[in-house]
Structure formats: C-alpha cells, structure tokens
Image (cartoon, grey):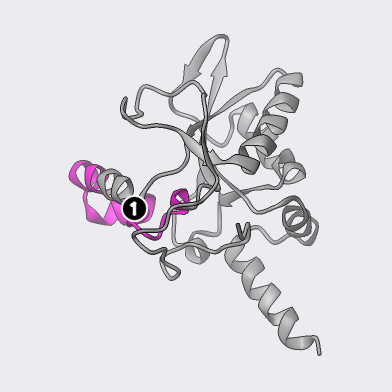
C-alpha cells in the first residue's frame, strides 16, 4: 500500500478499487451510522490507530473509528443522501463524490469520542479529544486531512474529525516542516525529486 497516495477531486480511484488488507474493526458506532455498515480499515493502519487510542486513553480521552472504509458504491449512497437533504452545493463541499473519497483507500476515517460513558455525536474543533489528536496524531503516522484555512487547497471544508494515515516518517516530515495538507506535501515532494540529480 502506498500510504502517501493522493486521492481528491483531481485524483480519482477506479470504481473497482478495493484495498487488499482490510480488516473488520470493532469500535462503538454513532447513531448516525448505517446499521448495515461494517467498519473496516487497513490492517496495519488499525494497529497504528490502536496504539494512538491507547495513549489517548492515558490522558483520559476515549477516541474511536466511527466511519472508515467505504466502497465506491457506498460512497455514492452517502453522497446521494447528503445531496437530498442539503443540496448539491453543500454535498460537494462536505462529501466526496465516489472515486474521490479517501475512505475508499482504507487509510482514512472519521473519529467519534466517548465522554462520561456517552458517545458524542457532534464533535467540533474545541473538543479536548480532537485537540489532542491534532497535536499528537503525527507521532503515529496520521494527519488531520482537511485542516482549517486550507479549504481552497483540499477542496473540502474543515473537518476536525477526519484523519488519514500517511506513515510515521511522512507525518513527522509534514509536522516538522509545517506542511498541513497532503496536496502541498505531494507537490513539495515532486519538486524535490525534480531538483535532485
């Protein structure tokens, strides 16, 4: 698996693309999840998440994967439901079209938190769990995929709950250099390759 794979509105996955090493994961799901949905994630990525989850718990933060792998067809269903409720313009800002969703890679997921024994359905950037994740997820190979202020670069509105595995080395390089989007990292990486002989 190429953990730096760039998937966005300009880099589309084939309809038939299914990651090879998906495993079913058992995490508490929010009420908004489709009861027929089966949470799956890349096997190695889930191991990395479990380590991050364990360390978050040491700080009394309970974090879980609420929505991870989505097939092309399932993403179509998600997009259609959002479009029906909120309109096309809203759906295009907040939800990826099928093929352009990172969820199809098995490397990305939304998080949900549990506080005082209750799963919190609506998370926001000021939640202490999400602040902890923003500050620490790079240590485990994850990035906040759609950061605030980078909407024009990513093509999506700020999503403080959406994280993506890129590998520990890449996440550390991005953190240390101040690069906050995979789009910017990919461009920088290409430029470096062009310069080197």
Q: Quadrant of residue 86?
A: top left
Query: Residue 155 location in percent, x, y?
Result: 44, 62
Q: Which residue shows up at 36% across the image and 29% down it? A: 33
Q: Which residue shows up at 34% across the image and 27% down it? A: 32
Query: Residue 55 location in percent, x, y?
Result: 75, 27
- Decide if residue 36 is on the left or right side of residue 6: left
User: The residue tagged with tag 1: helix, strand or loop?
Assistant: helix
Q: How many marks?
A: 1
Residue 148 or residue 166, whichever sits in front: 166
Query: Residue 115 location in percent, x, y?
Result: 57, 15
Query: Residue 5 location in percent, x, y?
Result: 57, 62
Residue 11 or residue 84, whichever sits in front: 11
Q: Is residue 102 magenta?
A: yes
Q: Quadrant of residue 98?
A: bottom left
State the residue position of label 1. Answer: 72
- Decide if residue 46 is on the left or right side of residue 82: right
Q: Is residue 92 visible?
A: yes
Kindly give the residue lying farthest to the top in the view shown. 117
**Residues drawn in magenta:** 80-104
Residue 30 or residue 73, whichever sits in front: 73
Q: Which is the main secondary structure of the residues drawn in magenta?
A: helix
Q: Is residue 153 above or below residue 110?
A: below
- Decide if residue 9 is on the left or right side of residue 43: left
Kindly give the residue lying farthest to the bottom in the view shown. 197
Q: Is residue 147 visible?
A: no
Where, quadrant-wise, is the N terminus in this rendering? bottom right
Residue 9 or residue 39, whichever sits in front: 39
Q: Is residue 31 above or below residue 93?
A: above
């Amino acid at each position: 698996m190429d953990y730096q794979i760039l998937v966005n509105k300009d880099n589309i996955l084939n309809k038939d693309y299914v990651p090879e090493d998906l495993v079913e994961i058992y995490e508490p799901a929010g009420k908004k999840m489709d009861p027929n949905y089966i949470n799956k994630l890349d096997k190695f990525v889930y191991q990395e998440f479990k380590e991050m989850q364990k360390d978050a718990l040491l700080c009394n933060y309970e974090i879980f994967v609420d929505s991870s792998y989505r097939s092309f067809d399932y993403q179509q269903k998600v997009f259609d439901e959002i479009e029906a409720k909120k309109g096309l313009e809203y759906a295009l800002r907040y939800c990826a079209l099928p093929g352009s969703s990172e969820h199809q890679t098995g490397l990305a997921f939304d998080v949900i938190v549990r506080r005082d024994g209750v799963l919190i359905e609506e998370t926001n950037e000021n939640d202490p769990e999400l602040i902890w994740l923003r500050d620490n997820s790079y240590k485990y190979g994850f990035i906040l995929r759609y950061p605030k202020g980078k909407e024009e670069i990513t093509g999506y509105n700020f999503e403080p709950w959406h994280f993506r595995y890129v590998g520990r080395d890449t996440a550390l390089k991005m953190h240390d250099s101040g690069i906050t989007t995979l789009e910017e990292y990919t461009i920088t990486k290409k430029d470096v390759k062009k310069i080197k002989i």
